[in-house]
Amino acid sequence: MTCALHPAIRISEIFGPTIQGEGVLVGLPTVFVRTGGCDYRCSWCDSLHAVDNRFRQEWKMMSPDAVWQKVVALSGGRPMMVSLSGGNPAIQPLGPLIDHGHREGYRFALETQASVARDWFAKLDVLVLSPKPPSSEMTTDWASFQACVEAARHKPQIVLKLVVFDEGDYAYAKDAAARFPQLPVYLQPGNHTPPQPGHEDGFIDMAGIMKRMEWLVERVIRDSWFAARVLPQLHVLLWGNKRGV
């Protein structure tokens, strides 16, 4: 049974298996399906190749069946976690892909800034909502965020993941957690050296990232914010901004 008759998905890259580098599933072997296109333009985006229209010529329109065959080939047909990322994967028609994978025993996680709600969020196994803090130069629509929570209908595991660069971002993270106290909170220090066209691996200020990580840990402990989990971007520590890992 295939899903080839369903709408095509704009794909930036499909790769793995590798480990999930951040958030609630950190360290878990995963195949990544990264979609192309985003409704945000964060100032520190570390996935410009899946966001900026300059890279459109690298994106492919693929049927859900073609995407699925690639996932199966990469995973050797052994069920595992599939991460749907972007860009903003919520703007793509991913419901049929999730249905197809579930029939074969795979699980699906999706990360989005929660700007677009989809009814197929309820099909996911894990939904990571990652609203963007002030340093991103984006504005959060909390009504849209609430719509995403409601669209999931309490079926997937839902978590709140926030990038923190500075005190302004930290205050934003505290406010977000207070708005949605039912959601587990994951914090990560920001990576402020995104890849540039022609330099996709970027330059990683590892000392700066680790200093920010230490500050964030100390800040959380000082505030007795014991419900928050502070994690690094493990993939950045291992591979920098290199694509496909």
Image (cartoon, rainbow, N blue to C red):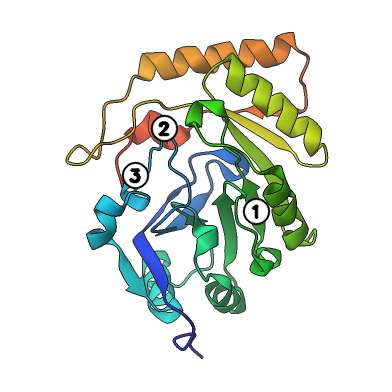
Q: Which residue is mark 3?
A: 48
Indicate which label's residue lies in the foreground, 2 or 1. Answer: 2
Who comes first in sequence, dot 2 or dot 3? 2
Q: Quadrant of residue 240?
A: top left
Mark 3 vs mark 1: give the one in front: 3
- Amino acid type for the residue under numbered disc 1: Leu
Q: Which residue is mark 1?
A: 127
Q: Which numbered disc, 2 or 3, marks the residue closer to the eye?
A: 2
- Vertical relation: 78 (above or below) 211: below
In this picture, is 57 found above or below 188? below
- Picture coordinates of residue 157, whole percent (x, y): 72, 53
Q: Quadrant of residue 164?
A: top right
- Residue at point 46% right, 33% down? 234
Question: Considering only order in the chain, which callout, 1 or 2, is on the residue closer to the N terminus?
Answer: 2
Q: Residues within 10 Å of mark 2 (few under 14, many from 20)?
A: few
Density class for disc 3 (Cα within 10 Å; few <14, some 14-19, many ≥20) is: many
Evaluate whether residue 82 shows in this view.
no
Query: Which residue in the rendered view is the most extreme toward the right?
Result: 182
- The percent position of residue 175, horizontal first and vertical second, equals 74, 28
| Circle 2: element type | loop
Between residues 225 and 194, which one lies in front from this camera angle? 194
Residue at label 2?
Answer: 43
Instruction: Determine whether, in the image, residue 195 is placed left or right of residue 221.
Output: left
Kind of residue sitting beneath label 3: Leu
Q: Secondary structure at mark 1?
A: strand
Image coords of residue 108 (percent x, y): 58, 62
What mark, if any, has residue 111 been given in the picture? none
User: Which kind of residue does numbered mark 2 sit on?
Assistant: Ser
Picture quadrant where residue 25 is located: top right
Crowdedness of circle 1 by 10 Å Cα count: few (<14), some, many (20+)? Answer: many
